[in-house]
Amino acid sequence: MTLLQVLELSVRAGEARLVRDVSFAVAAGERVGIIGESGSGKSVTSLAVTGLLARGLTASGSIELDGHEVVGAAEKSLLPLRGPVAQIVFQEPLTALDPLMRVGRQVAEPLRRHLGLRGSALRDAVAAAFAEVALEDPRIARAYPHELSGGQRQRVAIAIALAARPKLLIADEPTTALDVTVQDGVLALLERLVAERGMALLFISHDLAVVSRMTERIVVLRHGAVVEEGPVDRVLRTPQHPYTTALVASARALDSALDAEGAA
């Protein structure tokens, strides 16, 4: 069953096209990666999927999310999709989280809005949501975002995204702002939760190693257009497009340099 179908999606900022005729699909339970350098249109594409494009950006083409057309849809009709159908984990949780609201209330909001929980049922669900992302200290729920570490904030963001049990989780560079050790922990958490819940995953990154770990199929973007698509192993081992070949070569060169530095 196709959960997300993107057909000839274009996104414009005035006369400039940020995304050009992008097409791809994500099946229920499938893990798909979008890879490309900065400015390739990855994040803009992910925002378009849930109708969250910034003011001044316009989309054309078609985005069908769980049978609902997103392009051109009224905001009122999109609100019920954000949470139960699709949710995003953003790159920088400090800016994604409300700085003036305790994180426990932020986790509670989708549980109240989409699942209708109140009172003790809501409190229990909030505690369970924190425990699921390995934040079991009750003091964390009473903290504000700036009082938490980067890894804790990203785990809170994941708890919020998963609270309404979405069918599709969109992770937009979710570990870029974290150090390597914390990054590995967050990726392991996402892997576990996606597998346990049987969710579909759309993972956006510039890091080939991370994408190969997290996904089974990959879409390569360059200058806002798809240049290659296929199973991760095939694309990374035998890339067909010169741009993909250059990305893979750069990643291998960086890995070799890091290995040599570690051995020195």
Image (cartoon, rainbow, N blue to C red):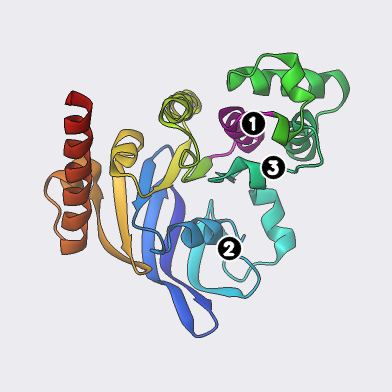
On screen, residue 97 versus residue 174, left or right, reads: right
Residue 250 appears anywhere in the view = yes
| Helix, strand or loop for disc 3 | loop
Residue 111 pos. (x, y %)? 74, 33
Magenta stretch bounds: 148-167
Q: Nearer the viewer, mark 2 or mark 3?
A: 3
Find numbered disc 1 in the image and state the secondary structure of the residue it sits on. helix
In three-dimensional space, the C-alpha distance between marks 1 and 3, rounded to whole angstroms, equals 9 Å
By secondary structure, the bulk of the magenta-drawn segment is best described as: helix
The residue lying furthest to the front in this view is: 264
Q: Residue at x 58, y 63 (%)?
A: 70
Which numbered disc covers residue 156? 1
Label whose residue precedes the other's in the sequence (1 or 3): 3
Tell me whether the residue at label 2 lies in contact with that at label 1, contact meaning CB atoms closer than 8 angstroms: no
Question: How far apart are the two marked residues, 2 and 3, measured between alpha carbons?
Answer: 24 Å
Residue closer to the observer: 259 or 18: 259
Q: Position of residue 2 (x, y in %)?
A: 42, 49
Tell me if 238 is positioned left or right of 130 in this view.
left
Q: The N terminus appears in which quarter of the rendering?
A: top left
Q: Residue 120 sits in which quadrant?
A: top right
In the drawing, what numbered circle is on residue 97?
3
Most distant residue in the top direction: 137
Extreme bottom residue here?
Answer: 15
Local crowd size for mark 3, using a 10 Å CA cut-off: few (<14), some (14–19), many (≥20): many
Kind of residue indicated by mark 3 = Leu
The residue at which mark 2 appears reads as: 70
Q: Residues within 10 Å of mark 2 (few under 14, many from 20)?
A: many
Residue 66's x, y, as percent? 53, 51
Residue 181 shown in magenta: no
Q: Position of residue 134 (x, y in %)?
A: 58, 18
Q: Earlier in the sequence, mark 2 or mark 1?
A: 2
Disc 1 to disc 3: CB gap under 8 Å: yes
